[in-house]
Amino acid sequence: MAHARLRIPILSTITTTAVKFSKTSFHVYGRHICHCSSPVSVSQQQQQRQPQIRSPQLVALEYADLSIPHIVCEELGALRVRQHVNPLSSTLSIPVEVPDWNDVFEDPKLPLVMDIGSGSGRFLMWLAKRNSGSKNYMGLEIRKKLVTRAETWAKELDLSNIHFVFANATISFKQLISTYPGPLMLVSILCPDPHFKKRHHKRRIVQQPLVEAITDGLMPGGQVFIQSDVLEVACDMRKYFDAESAKLVFDSDFDCDNEGWLLSNPMGIRTEREIHAEYEGGKIYRRIYRKLS
């Protein structure tokens, strides 16, 4: 995998005209007039007039070249999706049916990249578009509406090297990987649901059985990429993967800080959660592991 560096879209600077105000001034907002009895500096006025870039706009900019159609199809409706889903529920405890790999991929023997908790799917689609003919991509997601929409988008983009599955990775990962005709080269778990309450920690996706299944399923030299904007969750994931030191090692090809977290995202594109978190001033904690030969 090429170690591409993070590309942050350059936002054009919007200039405003400086206007001096007297001690008593009026501001007109649409049809409403606001009387201000205190002086307002030019710099403050510029800040007030400067359009604020929102994180959804940053997401749209970063994924602009996907040209994903922002239409609501009848099948999906308004697509209001629950942010938190209980992976231990009975409906998510049934292993998913293994697909016919020849139906979902043009070449099912290509190396596979799997994203556990693929969300909207934009992250994987961006990668799939750039690696058509050399890698296959699969997203596992437990929110069915997101999977349906991602599959719709993938068809609109005419991507033949990507597939999304409505599945609980804890239950279905091993079964899916054991039947895939090609090698598993990378597994990513990016900003998973933190399940903050202690009694809900058992719902976190990174648990020992899944970590063992990932480690066993990876090809020699294959990689695991984990990240979270919640330090506690990042440390929890790190603990589980560090415990596989007989088979997995931290990939030293990447620069990291004194605490062992990667300094930047090596994938060339940020996830939507990553964009939102950094917009709010948060830090992203990342690790990459490599399977020993």
Image: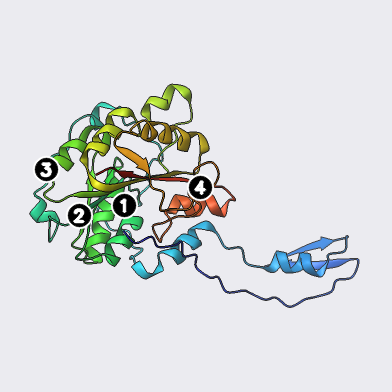
Could you tell me residue 215's position as x and y percent? 26, 38
Q: Quadrant of the N terminus?
A: bottom left
**Sooner in the amino-acid sequence: mark 2 or mark 1:** 1
Report the amino acid beneath label 2: Pro
Nearest to the eye among marks 4 and 1: give it.
4
* Color scheme of the displayed model: rainbow
**Where does the image place residue 227, in percent across and percent down from the top left?**
43, 44
Q: Are marks 1 and 3 in contact (CB under 8 Å)?
A: no
Residue pushed farthest top? 199
The residue mark sitting in front, 2 or 4, is 2
| Circle 1: residue type | Gly
Q: Which residue is mark 1?
A: 77
- Label 3: element kind: helix
Do the numbered discs 2 and 1 sit on residues whose CB atoms are within 8 Å?
no
Look at mark 2 in the image and give the residue it sits on: 111
Give the residue number, with chain letter if any, for mark 4.
284
Looking at the picture, which amino acid does disc 3 mark? Answer: Thr
- Give the residue at mark 3: 179
N-term mark: 3 or 2 = 2
Measure the C-alpha gap from mark 3 to mark 2: 13 Å
Left or right of residue 185, residue 231 in this image: right
Residue 168 at least partly seen: no
